């Protein structure tokens, strides 16, 4: 067994296990944790005695609340180019998860946001309990939906991906199933039994069929999805790829959804809203690999600007929840300024070579 204060790697019979071990910081991902996950996935992919990988989080508050963005912000202020390294390592890990040739199962209980969705949604099986809260809240900290979100948000039904990417709306388990973030619902009190069944199974034949059969034995119905019920309204209000047109549609609507959306937009970085809309609109059907390359380009540009550092200050450092965005309004965010976030990094572009 190899372990650290942050993450524990172990082998339990035919199963490689990854346990996030930072409950006080909601199991947020550091660069070293991402590097360790990548190294073990590469090793276990080549190990014929490992038939599946299971990822869990310590405690019942969070599976993983995302990347350690305070650490990234602190480093970025000193050297924004060097700070890209966190994202390079994280995205390399995310691609390894997406391309992993064996069953990769996330047992998700508690908060799962941002980078936490990166280490789960990019994998094959996302098993959520009844106590989850899922979200992509990056526009509220001056960032953008990353970790492959350009791909997985564009796979959501209708306009839900754009809605989630812009508003950071929080999802319960039924909503996460509708959005495609989850593949199965297994209650908290049955997840340990599921894990034990995966460990004790005989992997003779198709490992994916074996894992799917085991998960199905423990799976249930989480109930009705509010997100599903709102699908038509979301599709209507978010029909445009232009953020200002979306705002106009929402302002003209008197629904509860419209009121919630306007409140959410009031907290978001105008720049993040516009670059997110372009990011998703311009890349339907994008692969995870190409999504990560694009997102690396975008976050590299973000690290050179004001928004991210101000968003982290307001949300996580001073916690005054009053960010001073620059530009301050959607009207102030020009097309040229948006386009600058998509400019090539030249020799600094992210290179993701085949892993498996």
Image (cartoon, grey):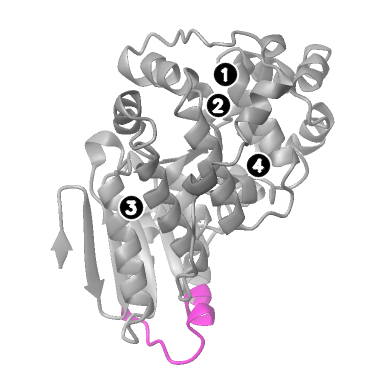
Give SS at disc 1: loop
Which residue has dot 4 on it? Answer: 225
Which residue has dot 1 on it? Answer: 268
Reading the chain from its start, which is encountered first: label 4 or label 2? 2
The Cα–Cα distance between marks 4 and 2, rounded to whole angstroms, is: 24 Å
The Cα–Cα distance between marks 2 and 1, rounded to whole angstroms, is: 5 Å
Give SS at disc 4: loop
Give SS at disc 3: helix
Which residue has dot 2 on it? Answer: 139
Above or below: residue 69 compared with residue 191:
above
Q: Crowding at label 2, few (<14), some or many (≥20) Cα neighbours within 10 Å?
A: many
Tell me which segment is drawn in magenta. 199-213
Q: Are marks 2 and 1 in contact (CB under 8 Å)?
A: yes
Q: In which quarter of the image is the N terminus?
A: bottom left
Q: Do the residues labelled 3 and 4 touch (CB within 8 Å)?
A: no
Q: Is residue 24 left or right of residue 189?
A: left
**Magenta: predominant secondary structure element?**
helix
Marker count (numbered): 4
203 falls in the magenta region: yes
Residue 301 seen in the figure: yes
Reading the chain from its start, which is encountered first: label 2 or label 3? 3
Judging depth in this view, the residue of 94 and 157 nearest the camera is 94
Reading the chain from its start, which is encountered first: label 1 or label 3? 3
Judging depth in this view, the residue of 333 and 106 nearest the camera is 333
């Amino acid at each position: 067994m190899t372990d650290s204060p942050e993450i524990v790697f172990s082998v339990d019979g035919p199963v490689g296990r990854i346990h996030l071990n930072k409950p006080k910081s909601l199991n947020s991902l550091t660069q070293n944790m991402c590097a360790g996950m990548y190294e073990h996935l590469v090793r276990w992919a080549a190990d014929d005695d490992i038939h599946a990988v299971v990822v869990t989080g310590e405690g019942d508050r969070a599976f993983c609340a995302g990347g350690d963005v305070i650490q990234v912000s602190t480093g970025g202020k000193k050297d924004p180019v060097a700070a890209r390294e966190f994202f390079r390592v994280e995205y390399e890990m995310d691609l390894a998860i997406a391309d992993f040739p064996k069953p990769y199962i996330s047992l998700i209980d508690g908060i799962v946001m941002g980078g936490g969705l990166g280490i789960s949604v990019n994998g094959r099986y996302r098993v959520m309990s009844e106590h989850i809260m899922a979200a992509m809240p990056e526009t509220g900290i001056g960032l953008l939906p990353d970790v492959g979100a350009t791909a997985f948000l564009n796979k959501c039904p209708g306009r839900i991906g754009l809605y989630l990417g812009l508003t950071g709306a929080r999802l319960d388990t039924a909503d996460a199933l509708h959005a495609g973030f989850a593949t199965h619902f297994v209650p908290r009190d049955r997840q340990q039994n599921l894990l034990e069944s995966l460990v004790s199974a005989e992997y003779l034949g198709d490992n994916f069929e074996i894992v799917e059969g085991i998960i199905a034995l423990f799976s249930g119905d989480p109930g009705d999805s509010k997100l599903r019920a709102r699908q038509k309204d979301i599709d209507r209000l978010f029909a445009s790829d232009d953020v200002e047109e979306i705002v106009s549609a929402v302002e003209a609507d008197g629904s509860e959804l419209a009121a919630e959306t306007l409140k959410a937009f009031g907290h978001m970085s105008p720049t993040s809203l516009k670059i997110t809309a372009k990011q998703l609109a311009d890349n339907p059907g994008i692969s995870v690999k190409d999504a990560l390359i694009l997102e690396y380009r975008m976050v590299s540009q973000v690290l050179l600007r004001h928004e991210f550092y101000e968003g982290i200050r307001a949300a996580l450092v001073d916690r005054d929840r009053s960010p001073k965005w620059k530009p301050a309004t959607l009207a102030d965010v020009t097309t040229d300024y948006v386009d600058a976030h998509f400019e090539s990094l030249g020799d600094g572009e992210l290179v993701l070579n085949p892993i498996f």
